[in-house]
Amino acid sequence: MASEMFRKELASVKPYVPGKPIEDVKREYGLDTVQKLASNENPLGPSPLAIEAMQGELEHLNLYPDPGCVALREALAAELSLASSQLVAGNGGEHLLNMVAMAFVGPGDEAVMSAPSFDVYAQSVGLMGGRPVQVPLKDHRHDLDAYLERIGPRTKVVYLCNPNNPTGSISPRAEVERFVSRLSEDIILLIDEAYYEYARARPDYPSGLEILKNRGSTLVLRTFSKIAGIAGIRVGYLAGSREIISELGKVKGTFYVNRLAQAAAVGALKDRAHIEKTVALNAECLGMMTAWFKSEGLKYVDSSANFIFVDTGKDSMRLFEELMRLGFIVRPGALWGYTTWLRVSTGTVEQTKDFLAALGGLL
Ligand SMILES: *Cc1c(COP(=O)(O)O)cnc(C)c1O
């Protein structure tokens, strides 16, 4: 098969490197139990109200899902004090990011983002023939002044991952407001709040929805994958102006959010208890990790998410392998050019304790 058969944009797209699945690690290393602290999943499991809602939906799977996701959008509208016409649901945040690139980025267009940040931004832009303009982090944070310098006449979208993945850092309100006041209204500002519930308690965490109120060409992305513990069913949403959300409907595809996902998301939205438990557990485990890192003299980035970025001082690929042999899957910083760093998700208290003991043994 000749490689020219493919669209030339495919050549520029780096395949996503996913966290290693638990089953693969068990098989390869002959382990009975493996702790996955690599993909920022919820260690408490799915929201019980989401499970209940999905169970009720099972017997209706002969029917196509509602392409308008009306029940979910109305529940979200009530929760977020928006109109349901300002919301579009998607098959996970990844699908929503692809929709944004499809709607705004054409061949030769540019999109500004941090490096490292969530990999899907660059991929989705590249797939459309656009050019990802990657701005290095400064002190592990978005360098918004540098963003402004890199914005040009072809810039269509600016990505602000807040908190940022893989560093867990936030851009504080004052910095974001200053940035927004200097950003042309002709450019889409995509604020990725995949970790919103974990970060919201920070007094200096800026709300994307507040920014959207005063700036129409803003989109706020959130997902049920992390906080609600339903990464496996794939559902998230974008909030934006009516006009933009309506246009995004054209690139959404028809039946992308399946019946179980729609039901699960409605259930999860009501599940305050699960959200609170998840946030509290995360704070406890981040506390355990940072206390231990401090006692060991390891550098880390202050996290507002459910993972933490830490400099072990050791080769991250080797440490990743050694941890896997002990039954812990993490993300090596080498994936993003940070050769001595690891990104580790918080787990249960026991998983976190065991992980720290294993890491201590290796260091
Ligand atoms: C996990 C994540 C998402 C979206 O995840 P989905 O499972 O596709 O909904 C989006 N942005 C960031 C920064 C993430 O970490």
Image: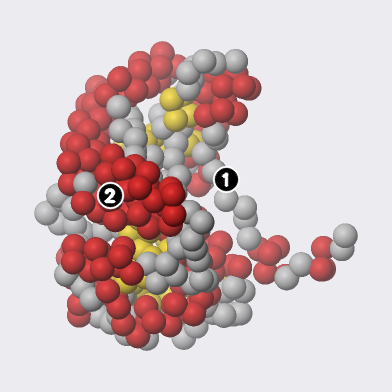
Check mark 2 vs ligand 1: CB closer than 8 Å? yes or no.
no
Expressed as whole percent of the image width and height from the top left, the position of residue 29 reads 60, 18
Q: How far is the residue under mark 1 from the one under mark 2?
A: 28 Å
> Which image quadrant: the C terminus?
top left
Mark 1 residue type: Val
> Which image quadrant: the N terminus?
bottom right
In the image, 325: left or right of 144? Answer: right
Check mark 1 vs ligand 1: CB closer than 8 Å? yes or no.
no
Q: Which mark is residue 268?
A: 2
Q: Which mark is residue 64?
A: none
Q: Earlier in the sequence, mark 1 or mark 2?
A: 1
Which quarter of the figure has residue 347? top left
* Front one among 59 and 197: 59
In the image, 54: left or right of 105? Answer: left
SS of the residue under disc 1: loop
Expressed as whole percent of the image width and height from the top left, the position of residue 20 reads 55, 35
Which quarter of the figure has residue 303? top left
In the image, 155: left or right of 87? Answer: right
Which residue, given by chain and number where applicable, does mark 1 sit on? 17
